[in-house]
Amino acid sequence: MTVLLVTAPPRREGDAILELEWALGRVRVRGTDWKGVLLAETPLSRGEALERLRGFEIQALQRVVPLDVIVPARRGDIERAVLELAKRIDGTFAVRARVRGNKKLSGGELEAGMGSIIVERFGYSVNLSDPDCTVVVEVLGKKAGVGVVKRGELLRPDVAD
């Protein structure tokens, strides 16, 4: 099962859902409490899902972020998930965190803290401008999606507003 966090321009969520259904076939898409933010689950492999989306003419999808796990949005749970997934980092890395609807967490603090822990534990090199892998942390209220995304797996199609 592949989980994707998808963003679309506000009021274009319906178009984004249709594009996901057309491109992926079997997919379950759920809205979130944030305008333009959707969660999609598909039985396709990550590689196949991303390849299908790359080959599809996209009009409404702004960003597609593959996630590996969903955990409670608590620093300790996120840290455990990051450390488990960090074993898959190959080469340089960066941590990118986006926090929505959670005043206890900060994106900048998560990026710095998780990056320090990965360097301390594994000795990987940080490259903030062009990393081989990006550890993504997407906090949505009480839940957080965490993933290790290789270069080219984060989709940012050009979208007309």
Image (spheres, rainbow, N blue to C red):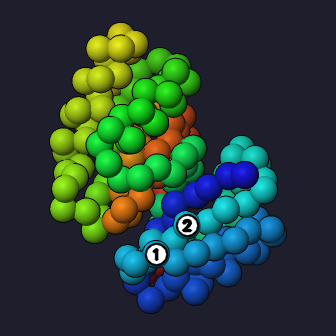
**Label 2 belongs to which residue?**
39
Nearest to the observer: residue 57 or residue 81: 81
Residue 26, placed above or below residue 99:
below
Quadrant (top left/top right/bottom left/bottom right) for the C terminus = bottom left
Residue 141, placed above or below residue 69:
below
Which three-letter amino acid code belongs to the residue tagged 2? Answer: Leu
Query: Residue at point 76% right, 74% down?
Result: 22
CB-based contact (under 8 Å), mark 1 and mark 2 = yes
On residue 89, which mark appears?
A: none
Residue 117 left/right relative to 104 = right
Q: Position of residue 20 (x, y in %)?
A: 67, 71
| Secondary structure of the residue carrying numbered label 1 | loop
Residue 61 left/right relative to 19 = left
Residue 151 at least partly seen: no
Query: Residue at point 31% right, 17% down?
Result: 119
Query: Residue at point 62% right, 78% down?
Result: 17
Q: Position of residue 77 (x, y in %)?
A: 39, 41
Q: Earlier in the sequence, mark 1 or mark 2?
A: 1
Whole-number angstrom distance, CA of label 1 to CA of label 2: 7 Å
Nearest to the observer: residue 35 or residue 73: 73
**Label 1 belongs to which residue?**
32
Q: Position of residue 137 (x, y in %)?
A: 39, 47
Residue 64, placed above or below residue 117:
below
